[in-house]
Image (spheres, grey):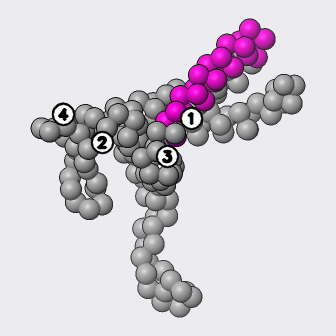
Amino acid sequence: MAFGFEFGGKLGKVLLTAFRIVAVTGLIFFIRIMIKKGAPTGFVLALALITAGAAGNIIDSMFYGLIFSESNYMDGSGVASLFPEGGGYGTFMHGRVVDWAYFPIIRGQWPEWFPWKGGQNFLFFRPVFNLADSAITVGVGWVLLFQRKFLRTL
């Protein structure tokens, strides 16, 4: 789930991964249909980006818990190690999607006169994401911005 949200514990994790698998399978079939119908190349490429991003997140959540140790930059536990003794931090389908891209744009402090936040630190653009998330975002954005005319014909 985006931005570290959790959904229903261990069962929720399995259900989310199963949903992703069904969604990717459906997208693959939809892409094939769109190609046969002569859909614009931009639309097909956008769907391919969404599908590839979702597939990347599936791989992370299925296998990363098996092959990596626990790691959390924020609590200082360090970088994860590959194939740790005793196994990874999770079981099959209970891994976490690995987020590694972090680009804080503005760091600063609220002015003292600012209500409720005065004197506190702020950080603009805090999300941490990965290449798969970027592919999904770019694909959806491409469809919404440049393929609206084609979407109306579906």
Q: Amino acid at mark 2?
A: Gly
Q: Amino acid at mark 1?
A: Phe
Look at the numbered disc 2 and give the secondary structure of its residue: loop
**On screen, residue 150 above or below 5:** above
Query: What is the CA distance from the residue labelled 1 to the residue labelled 2?
Result: 19 Å
Name, please, the residue furthest toward the top. Answer: 36
Question: Within the image, what quadrant is residue 107 found in?
Answer: bottom left
Residues rendered magenta in the picture: 16-39
Residue 118 lies left or right of residue 23; in this view the side is: left
Residue 44 lies left or right of residue 79; in this view the side is: right
Look at the numbered disc 3 and give the secondary structure of its residue: helix
- Please tell me the numbered disc located at residue 19: 1
Count of numbered circles in the view: 4
Q: Amino acid at mark 4?
A: Phe
| Among the two numbered marks 2 and 3 on one chain, the one whose residue lies closer to the N terminus | 3
- Please tell me the numbered disc located at residue 12: 3
Q: Nearer the viewer, mark 4 or mark 3?
A: 3
Question: Within the image, what quadrant is residue 114 found in?
Answer: bottom right
Callout 4: few (<14), some (14-19), or many (20+) C-alpha neighbours within 10 Å? few
Q: Residue 103: where, in percent of width, then height?
A: 42, 53
Query: What is the CA distance from the residue labelled 1 to the residue labelled 3?
Result: 10 Å
Look at the numbered disc 4 and give the secondary structure of its residue: loop
Query: What is the CA distance from the residue labelled 4 to the residue labelled 3?
Result: 26 Å
Q: Nearer the viewer, mark 2 or mark 4?
A: 2
Quick check: can you spot residue 3?
Answer: no
